[in-house]
Image (tube, rainbow, N blue to C red):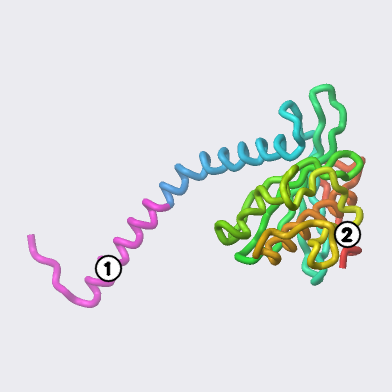
Amino acid sequence: MKKLESTLLNMVLVLTSVAVIMGGILAYVNHLTEGPIAAQKSKALADGIKTVMCVADLKVAKTDTVKQNDAKGKEMTYVIYQTQDAQGHDLGAAVESTTGGFGGDLKVLVGFDAEGNILGYTLLEHAETPGLGAKADKWFQKGEKGDIIGKSPAEPLTVSKDGGQVDAITASTITSRAFLLAVNNAYTAYKATPTDGETGATTKNNGDK
């Protein structure tokens, strides 16, 4: 078999062939994994909703999307999962809310009862510093130093350093502010949710500026 000449054209052809083959392999692997990854995310969300609503046996009766402008005028999207118990009684809602933390986006899932009091929360995504800002997953839970469970953000929750009623995470004031902002925005979105709209309805509220 004649050896392939080492010319610029041949090198380009070889590199292109390798790139095409590797691209095909990556696309195939991605196709194989996207299903399990989606299923894993769906399960994590379902488990998170049960956790923040403090009820093991519930169903999501309706999902709404609310768009609001944040304090800087940036449009943010909130997903509200209206929940019911096994008997069909309204429990309140779990709300997805995202703000910018110290290290990147901070996505929180917050559970509210019908009156708007906080039932629970969990962090869905964050890029905060391990051992500092990452403590937000525990710091604001019931019985902890920054306990917000049972409180209502009708009066926005703020850290004590800003004259508020919530103790900030030690050495992580920025993360604490971002977390509480996410909770406050989740409450505002929850209160803006249409009570008789169709599933997947979108409400745009520009009042939060």
Q: Amino acid at mark 2?
A: Asn
Cα distance in 3D space between marks 2 and 1: 55 Å
Q: Amino acid at mark 1?
A: Leu
Figure quadrant of the N terminus: bottom left
Segment colored magenta: 1-26
Q: Which residue is mark 2?
A: 205
On residue 126, which mark appears?
none
Q: Is residue 175 visible?
A: yes
**Residue 131 magenta:** no
Q: In the rendered view, tell whether residue 51 sits above or below residue 57.
A: below
Front-lying residue, 75 or 101: 101
Q: Is residue 1 left or right of residue 21?
A: left
Badge 1: residue crowd in 10 Å (few <14, some 14–19, many ≥20): few
Q: Are marks 2 and 1 in contact (CB under 8 Å)?
A: no
Front-lying residue, 140 or 120: 140
Q: Residue at x 79, y 61 (%)?
A: 159
Figure quadrant of the C terminus: bottom right
Q: Is residue 19 left or right of residue 152?
A: left
**Residue 23 magenta:** yes
Local SS, label 2:
strand
Q: Residue at x 82, y 44 (%)?
A: 118
On residue 13, which mark appears?
1
Place of residue 73 in the rendered image (x, y in percent of width and height, measured from the top left): 81, 70
Q: Is residue 131 left or right of residue 198?
A: left
Local SS, label 1:
helix
